[in-house]
Amino acid sequence: MAGCCTSDLRPPGMPMLPLSGLAASSMLTGCGGGGDDSKPTPTFVSAAFGSMAAPTTTANMATAYVASTLTVTLSDGSTHTSNLAYEPFFLTGTQVSNGAGGQILAGGYYDINNQPILDTTCTTSQQFFSDSPDGTSLLTVPNAKVTGVSGNTVFAVVQFEYTTWAQDGTTDMYGKLPSPIAVLTLDQNPSTGKLSLVKYHNVDTSGVHGLWITCGASLSPWGTHLSSEEYEPDAWSLPSYWSAFQTNLADSTVKPYHYGHLPEVTVKADGTASIAKHYCMGRISHELVQVMPDNRTVLMGDDATNSALFMFVADTEKDLSAGTLYVGQLQGDFNTALLAGTSSVGWKWIKLGHATSDYVEALADTLSKEDIMDVKFVDPTIADPNATDYTKIYVSGKANWVKLVTGMEKAAAFLETHRYAYLKGGSMGFTKMEGTTVNIKDKIAYSALQNMQDSMVTNNTAKGWNAASRIGLDAALKAGGVLAHTLAGSQVDKDGNTINSEWVPVSTKVLLTGEDITADSLGNTANPEKIGNPDNLKFSEKLRTLFIGEDSGQHTNNFLWAYNVDTKQLSRILSVPAGGESTGLHAVDEINGWTYIMSNFQHAGDSSYVKNNAALNTAINTNYNNKFSAAVGYLTASSTSIKLRA
């Protein structure tokens, strides 16, 4: 068609979302051209997401609903607006191609011997599968070649956090199964950017003792998938599901210290992968880490009560197997005044230790908890813990009295990180510091606080508040918020030693907050026009946009938001099924000319509001396999948004 702008002729640098179900000749308008070669080609200037209203009908509340837009502005003043849509690769619990002529269960669980784990709670046994897909990375590998790909070969790594219920619908399965992680081989249509699943490969995790509650994830600058192990099993107070985990893993020899670390998945050219677990990055509640552009500095949130901001500086670029671990110490008060976003508080960094992954793994293999420290919980033999050589600290909201075994500093730093960081003076008073991401141009990192309650509220000692953390709000803000950390180089740690990084947080302010409300007619207890319980965070340099996914019991439908850091516009761009959680967020500025926003959801319908709403409950059951299934997918530009030139 004369004057039609094709994908190959679009302005340089213009972000192009993949086009779902669209012929190659049907491309974007507003790209300049029109047959006049004398005019300079316009260039990309900015992008803005148009916000959609929160869903209110049963049909829209019961699915992954999208009614948002993306508007691109070019240097000649022209604009193009695309309607957005959601494109799933699969629902968990369905059979998909294994790339070898057979099929495999999407989200299926396997033990340490790579044998399917069977759910026997009903008459007919079946393999367990997850309803909670989480961290996802989209990437390419040089010289990739996979049978069945006719276009460009693209890979996605997706991990599965847990499964909510056994098939009987009443047996709680949280934390009882070793988390699976898979590589998806995707066929990228060069003309439309559309991704189609060709092969699903389950990664063998036996070499790293299996995986424990894999939550958020990020893509390293060198193209590997950085996973997570959330809520590390406390060796001193093991969770009730620890023994079930060992049984389902089929390995009773594993120890709590084998978990709570950071796994790294390296995808191979044939769509398989290897995995390593980095034991030297602190045994904390890893959620979603961010590697800085130096390929060495890693900023890490800590999704726990009495959590902190941690930092790891690797010895060598693109190698996380050895380095130095730090914990942040606030240099002022994180108080209610800070929530206005007009002031900031400074940081100093405390060195916890230096180690290699192999060294710490050997400690995890051989040491018992008593070898490292002595921990008491309201022990009558300690008449006055504060007057003895025990130190009172708070872990997960509970008081502990701790005494370090002489000479075990390094073991404590890397295997009892929460307790040791508290002893060393870290600001251990945050609640659920989740996803972390970076705005490279402005040298600002962002962290999500899913909520601000419990240990963050002054004098709430029953929930872990401690004055030493310098964190003390006048009242809880359950809806949470997003922090912005200013980054700089030439920093020294608390002992005066140089920190070998140019990407060290030096101050923090509050960027966005949610708002607690009295429950509305749709069951929201946080203002639906603001963020609520932020979790996943990813920043797009090209779009100048911070994407925010929610893990909210306060929004009946959790949302994915886009916040433009220049215009300060906050736009709702996706709503996941009611009772579900927005997960798997990954913003990719460009793969073979196409821009991607990856998004999954978890545990659709898992809320009392849904269960008490018969029509909504029925609709979700119909859409998602009686709530046992969830989607892995991405945002696209829908075909209805495409307009041809005359």
Image (cartoon, rainbow, N blue to C red):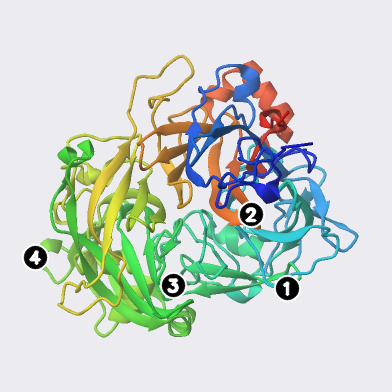
Q: Residues within 10 Å of mark 1 (few under 14, many from 20)?
A: few
Residue 380 lies in quadrant: bottom left
Measured Cα–Cα span from mark 1 to mark 4? 64 Å
> Which residue has dot 2 on it?
593
Horizontally, residue 405 falls left or right of residue 61, namely left
Residue nearest the observer in this picture, 317 or 170: 317
Measured Cα–Cα span from mark 3 to mark 1? 23 Å
Q: Are marks 3 and 1 in contact (CB under 8 Å)?
A: no
Q: Are marks 1 and 4 in contact (CB under 8 Å)?
A: no
Disc 4 is placed on an element classified as helix
| Comes first in the chain, label 4 or label 3 | 3
> Which residue has dot 1 on it?
143
Comparing labels 3 and 1, the label whose residue is closer to the camera: 1
Q: Are marks 1 and 2 in contact (CB under 8 Å)?
A: no
Image spot of residue 414 (x, y percent): 37, 74
Horizontally, residue 183 falls left or right of residue 385, namely right
Residue 591 lies in quadrant: bottom right
> Which residue has dot 3 on it?
295
> Which residue has dot 4 on it?
387
